[in-house]
Image (tube, rainbow, N blue to C red):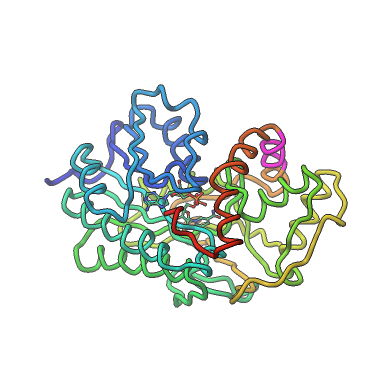
Amino acid sequence: MKKKVGHTNSEIILVTGGAGFIGSHFIKYISHKYPNYKIINFDKLTYAGNLNNLTGLGDDQNYTFVKGDIAVNSDVENVFEQFNPSFVVNFAAETHVDKSILDPNIFLKTNIMGTQNLLNHSKEQDVKKFVQISTDEVYGSVQKDSPSIEDEKISSNNPYSASKAAADQLVRVAHHTFKQRVNIVRSCNNYGANQFPEKLIPTIISNAMNNQKIPIFGSGSNIREWLYVEDHCRAIDLILHDAVPGRIYNVGSGIHYTNLEITKLILKQMDKTDELIEFVEDRKGHDFCYAINSEKIKKELNWEPEFSFASGIKQTINWYVDHQDWLKEIQSGDYLKFNQKVATEGLMEDFR
Ligand code: NAD
């Protein structure tokens, strides 16, 4: 079915992985900015998916949650047939590098096969724009003073990143071979409210709140670039609506910290002692530095990050301090069971 290119004020947007960290922020952002858009949140609700991230939206007539797996073709077919989306934004993914090192297969299934299923149905229904949420990790480790540009060679060093890189290639193929209107967004590390406490910043805040040791890989000298999640959502909105199909955009803040620096900074802000820091054995194949050049999105789409690290991290810490119930619920549920199981059996089977 042919869809008119361009956008109206009543689009149907399929957001996959919308119960996760960035996807839930994006849904709230879109629902606020485009109140007439119909938003379909399609999520498998893995251990990382949490509908509490979307509290308040449940009563909105323009918001629908559909439980489903992007890697299961019939689930994807059903949601496309039922809603006939005009836009697709794919956040759904297995996202934790350490888990990918323990057990890569689910990463290949969700991140690669899942993306291809979404592309197939987007092609069939002539979706106006498909946006793939990728990551700076696909470029591999780089020098901080020579940040990656979009046409840099892809050079993944862990199963998570390799699966995201493979998905990027499939999205590229969809445009090159099938003329699908796609974009790829490669952002640096995000931080903000509602991030699952397996990732660095929520781990630091949560452990610090409870005066627990904060594990830091190796010597803590690995460097990451940090972007406040709302700045990422604004960039995705611009790319979805205004970017020329086929283009890839880096989305970064230009703010870099070593893991040790960021830990000390947060501890200071929380009035906690550095003695909580505990150095642990380094991650296998740990990339030393991610850094991206984001001039393209600035020039073409007039995007700039709006949040300084000082203001973003203050809001993030305050959110976790004010939402300890959110953390407790997660930490007493699947997440804890998951970690216990991995620790004792090294298996992820029950959590797929
Ligand atoms: P997250 O782990 O918080 O959430 C992932 C969501 O996807 C969860 O709600 C989960 O239930 C869902 N999901 C997983 N497998 C699924 C499947 N097979 N079918 C349907 N839903 C499924 O992830 P996040 O941090 O919000 O990341 C979102 C996207 O952004 C990912 O694609 C990730 O690669 C990318 N990204 C994240 C960051 C970051 O710093 N968090 C940085 C750059 C890019």
Above or below, comparing residue 352 to residue 174 in the picture: above
Q: Residue at x 28, y 53 (%)?
A: 72
Total number of numbered discs in the rendering: 0
Above or below, comparing residue 85 to residue 343 in the picture: above
For the stretch drawn in magenta, the main secondary structure is helix
**Position of residue 352 in the picture relative to residue 181 (left or right):** right
Quadrant in the picture for the C terminus: bottom left
Q: Nearer the viewer, residue 70 or 119?
A: 70
Query: Picture coordinates of residue 19 (x, y %)?
Result: 45, 41
Above or below, comparing residue 88 to residue 147 in the picture: above
Does the magenta portion include 20? no
Query: Picture coordinates of residue 129 (x, y %)?
Result: 29, 50
Does the magenta portion include 317? yes
Residue at far left of view: 1
Q: Which residues are magenta?
A: 314-321
Q: Nearer the viewer, residue 226 or 299?
A: 226
Query: Picture coordinates of residue 283 (x, y %)?
Result: 63, 71
Query: Picture coordinates of residue 265 (x, y %)?
Result: 79, 53
Above or below, comparing residue 44 to residue 162 in the picture: above
Q: Residue at x 78, y 43 (%)?
A: 210
**Position of residue 106 in the picture relative to residue 254 (left or right):** left
Q: Residue at x 42, y 26 (%)?
A: 58
| Displayed quadrant of residue 224 | bottom right
